[in-house]
Amino acid sequence: MSQNVLRRRRLQISNPAEMSTPRKQKFCEKGMCLFVILVAVVAGIVAVCVVTLTDKDLRQRVPSPPRLEWWKTTIIYQIYPRSFQDSNGDGTGDLKVVTKRLDYLQELGVGTLWLSPFYKSPMRDFGYDVQNYTQVDPLFGTMDDFDVLMKEAKKRGLRVLVDFVPNHTSNESSWFNNSRHSIGKYRDYYIWDDGVNCSTCPDTNFKMPPNDWKSAFRGSAWTYDDNRKQFYYHAYLDSQPDLNASNPDVKQELKNVLRFWLEKGVDGFRGDAIRKLFEFEDVHRNENGVLNLTRNLPGVYPVMREWKHFLDKYSHGKGQEKILIAESYGITNEMRDAYYEVDSIPFNFAFVQKLNPSCKARCIKQIIETSLDGLKEEWWPNFVLGSHDVSRIASRMGDSFVNVLNILLLTVPGTPTTYYGEEIGMKDTFYTYSESRDPAGLNYKEDYLKYSRDPGRSPMQWDSYTNAGFSNGTPWLHVNLNYPVLNVEEQLSKETSTLNIYESLAKLRQLPSFTNKNIIFSTVNDNIISYVRSESGHPKYLVVLNVGSRDSVVDCSGPPLGVSSAQVVLAAGSSLLGMSSYRMGDSADLQAIHLKSAEGVIFKI
Ligand code: GLC
């Protein structure tokens, strides 16, 4: 049947005026018409009065908070596909299994998946060196696998974000190959320079890089290309040449990449290494270890704005907004504000960068305050606890603190991001130098433990069977030895497990009192941080967390609450030692809240 016929049929059925015309005529013929209209008008007036009263009354008692965009109430869950689960025994995770795990993720209560790159790549930086932006690397599966994943995610109401890597490509991409050979428009796709003569070398014609800019992965950020007889700039590996973000053709290419994935139905993007998009124009200036000529330069913002506008074209109404989240490390609050003008949210890495064992309650309070400070009405906060680039929170802060930190992440204002495995409190895994895979570590043989990101990328621990249920083959990185006791299956069966606490938190944070920007701190001492989340017309919630190493007692009955008792709605003990002394549903005395180290409780007022 043609589309037109179908459309017409639907129009016919959905046109009630057309359908009811004959009956109306009969009615009026019987002389009832005037009477019916009169009754209808009177009934209408009465109904309006009743509805207005009820509505007003309701609004006074239970005012509903403004309906928020989906990304403001969701939890983002980062999947590093190569470490999530492997379906074909090659030791590397793949997209097929992500689809199989959607039920798990839905149960967990996370609403949005962010997939780290799964695009065609030589994998020198494990996918962050993209060879082709619109192909799936066979290691991860096929485009069909991705389409199925999207379809199944949508069915479950899950959103999908993909990684967008605009700063650099792989040196094996066709763009770079064409650029090395100065072919047509590709000539200026990257940042090329002749370099300078080496005045102190025996051969003074010997070429040196044009400046002292450093690669994030060690050494000069410039590599000489024998074909082109010029240096190219790379903020990361020499196999990750930086694109020339000022070039209009490059800009168009990148928009095409966005378009491709938007048309596949993704809900948005995490923008990789955004702060490195632009470099100082005069490449003959040195940074001398003090200047910043390569990070968060103002050119970043107009480009981001263009992408944001582009995404807006695909945001077809409420619930369909497409988002852009910038990876934005090391930014000042001023830069944060500039990012807010041009993306949905810039990732807030304050917890990632500032939480450490000596950062206790007051320090955490300050992190929260600084993160929220000066946010304009329309800007939405967010917090991130971990990622594929840093050590896991259990290892950074001590494994007993995973529960309290998950409570913190999921109860402070804004969108939280959880890195895979942190819902069960996975720890960093030790790898010898020869077992290491991350170039950031391999480039520092003598100091690889300091730089390697492998420890936080070990395979997801699903169960206590071979390789933690990650793979039947040999995992690309071996699993953590603690997997027989620390895994999803084990935790599903224990009511007080880190996983079950995470699930309860995910449900709780959907309540209006948590999905707004209000936070009022209650008592904060050396060990304990406590705060109130509220929404007018809804119950208030008091969150009390012992982030210190000693047991402590606090009185939270004073301002801002002014109540002496409340009901426990969530209680979590240390992730290592288990049980809290508080029980769900119990009424508790707020004048003396006793919390052991790493214990956290949420009370409903
Ligand atoms: C981002 C990624 C990191 C990668 C780098 C280069 O910082 O998070 O994993 O190595 O960009 O693409």
Image (cartoon, helix red, strand yellow):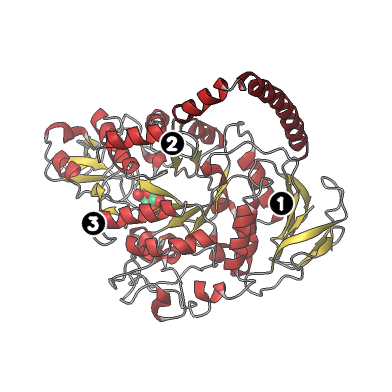
Element marked by disc 3: loop
Answer yes or no: is residue 228 visible. yes
Q: In which quarter of the image is residue 322?
A: top left
Mark 3 touching mark 1, by CB under 8 A?
no
Foreground residue among 379 and 316: 316
Mark 2 vs mark 3: give the one in front. 3
Q: Which mark is residue 362?
A: 1
* Coordinates of residue 589 in the picture (x, y in percent): 86, 61
* Coordinates of residue 443 in the picture (x, y in percent): 33, 59
Q: Residue 434 carries which label?
A: none
Element marked by disc 1: helix
Left or right of 344? Residue 602 is: right
Q: Mark 3 points at which residue?
A: 122
Q: Is the shortest distance between ligand 1 and the CB of mark 3 under 8 Å?
A: no
* Coordinates of residue 103 in the picture (x, y in percent): 46, 63
Please tell me which residue is depicted at 31% across the width and 53% down the height of the picture: 147
